[in-house]
Amino acid sequence: MEVLKIATAGSVDDGKSTLIGRLLYETNSLTQDKLDAIWKSSKSKGYDYPDLSLATDGLVAEREQGITIDVAHIYFSTENRRYIVADSPGHVEYTRNMITGTSTSQASIVLIDASKGVKEQTARHLFINKTLGIQQLIFAVNKMDLISYNEDVFLKICAEIKNLLLTQGIKSTHSFIIPVSALYGEAIAHPSEQMAWYSGPTLLKAMESLSTSDPAANNKARFTVQSVIRPEASKTYDFRGYAGRLNGGNLQKGDHLTILPGLQSATISDIHFFNQSYDKIQSGTSCTLLLDKDVDISRGSVLVRTDDVPELSRQINATLCWLDSNQLQVNRKYYLQQGTKTVQAKVKSVDAVYGIDFRPEASNTDQLELNEVAEVQIALSDPIINEDFTQHRSTGRFVLIDAITNNTVGLGLIRN
Amino acid sequence: MLNKTLVQNPLESEGIYIIREVAAQFNNPVLLFSGGKDSITLVHLARKAFAPGRIPFPLLHIDTGHNFKETITFRDALVEKYNLELIVRHVQDNIDRGDVIEEKGKYASRNGLQTQTLLDAIEEFKFDACIGGARRDEEKARAKERIFSVRDDFGQWNEKKQRPELFDLLNGRIHLGENVRVFPISNWTELDVWNYIEQENIELPSLYFAHWRDTFERDGLIWTADDSIVYRETDETITKRHVRFRTIGDMSCTAAVESSASNIQEVIQEIAESGISERGARIDDKRSEAAMELRKQQGYF
């Protein structure tokens, strides 16, 4: 069955958790014991209806404060496909968790409170989606019940959204704007009687129309080596295989490869997986490659077709999202991890910082704060593949790791 | 003709990728083996990840002393068959040393006590990564878990300070004394595990299939009647029921479900039709709304 990974993002109190709870409820995904637990909590709070937001908010602090702090992964399915929802926080303080949730998704639901309209947070969420290359967007204008299901208010919000898309230069392949009430289940799974004026798809119908295909499938073949497999006890033959995963494209036996960063050449002699031999692999496959000759390959090497060798560089430009409460310091040493390769890195300059309206503003700062996004230049101890994120979704991205705290402190998208 | 394409389930591909990352990024990983279907699936994935080589890390079983005998028999046969390295540590030893105190009363269980034994084993062997079979669909605190989940040197999970985890970029850097809990099947659902077991023809303990068993009923759940391990009141009468287990933990914290499913296809059918979640049969989760979160903060996996 197909799987769609979809992130939700919204401001505090947009009713995001209620919306997901509602989707679970409408698709019969809440088991009886979970429904019982929701009723039990709801009654203890004095509600006479099931508080569906309780289906997702897990942590004690989240329940106390009534907000989402960290990404919860929610699973449900319809007759057509399975969904993994990355339910992410909307509060600005937890933007890094939203980036975490959005990074593994193929689509996003952006929530807007109909009674409040488009907010700064909406623009931020759009900007994050754009930066992470998410092209399928659904705008759910929630809490329509609070504005008496008024069409004029909805149309005004639609205009604000379109304006925002224009300002940020976002051309999404799929985009829907849907008026809903998660609390009362209007236009979620069934057409709304309260909003007879709305003729578009329900939220669920819009979700069913999104594409589930691997966004990297059409990118070039990049086989990322995780380790070398050389069993000691191979008595019958001398086995030396390169364990890793293919990101993008496909590879087959007999393909001529170039090994990065060493630029040696070799040919695929066999594709091995669990004691069987194969001729061909597609993007996303974990397996072990055997080559026609012994070459210097280790963890972090990337195998590419000889007729398609990307540029290597010790200088890269990138969009950097800063995710740590300790500021980024220009010229301080960090580790940069691209795929399975780790090198040392220093941010040499911050050229532009995205401001309040999420447009780049020229800068000569030498620091970045938590949740700031900037265009930077980075110098590296060793060369990495310098491939634009929009050209390759897998090699075009990296994380920065603090050499002292070991925390993941930044996400980078290469701009070439 | 080159036509034999390796077609891989994306969940399997992801699981193998994660397990290989653990072997490459850590000095001394271990696979937490409970004898349940999820950890059995992990062993299968690890075999696939490193074939034709051996799994480059041992299995660790925390034996509460309240295990079903079928679990232990199965564990030993699996280790023998695939030439695995197994380490066993016993909760009883911690009780004998006085590190932990056995719970009393009707709901006494050793489930919570095993955290201490696990943390001791991590310290004894200096394990820096513990691979576990927890899944995000199981429970609301687990739904928030990262794939690489860093624990401090007290084994604690700090849910408000989780590292960002971006795309498939897994950061396993830690300080000496810390460890990482790794969950390769995070994104699988219960049904995914069963479908995979069927697809791969993975052997399971007989407990997962319907069998006759001495049981009694308490709080609407079916408990195993074994007076040496599970406390039973005099008015809780023993009845023979045809049951199977949907999840396997200790005898004192795992309830059975009535069933006629004798093979994997029938189990899958029953799960698909069931109105109860998997951990609905876990007595340990019913203690409070945040039972799992609290145990995780203390070092439970």
Image (spheres, rainbow, N blue to C red):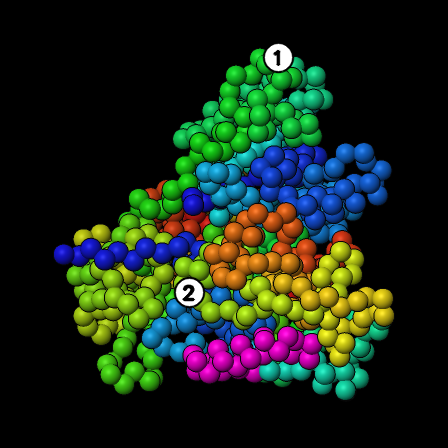
Q: Which residue is mark 1?
A: A152
Residue A241, quarter of picture: bottom left
Q: Name the side, left or right, on which A88 lies relative to A209.
A: right
Q: Check if mark 1's residue and mark 2's residue have beta carbons within 8 Å.
A: no
Please give the name of the residue rendered at 49% of the width and 26% of the height, measured from the top-left corner.
A176
Q: Amino acid at mark 2?
A: Asn
Residue A304 at x, y = what percent? 26, 57
Q: Quadrant of the N terminus of chain A?
A: top left
The chain under label 2 reads: B
Q: Name the side, left or right, on which B49 lies relative to A333.
A: left
Residue A51 at x, y = what percent? 74, 38
Residue B297 at x, y = what percent? 71, 63
Residue B201 - label: 2
Tag 2, which secondary structure?
A: loop
Q: Residues within 10 Å of mark 1 (few under 14, many from 20)?
A: few
Instruction: State which region is magenta.
Output: B63-87
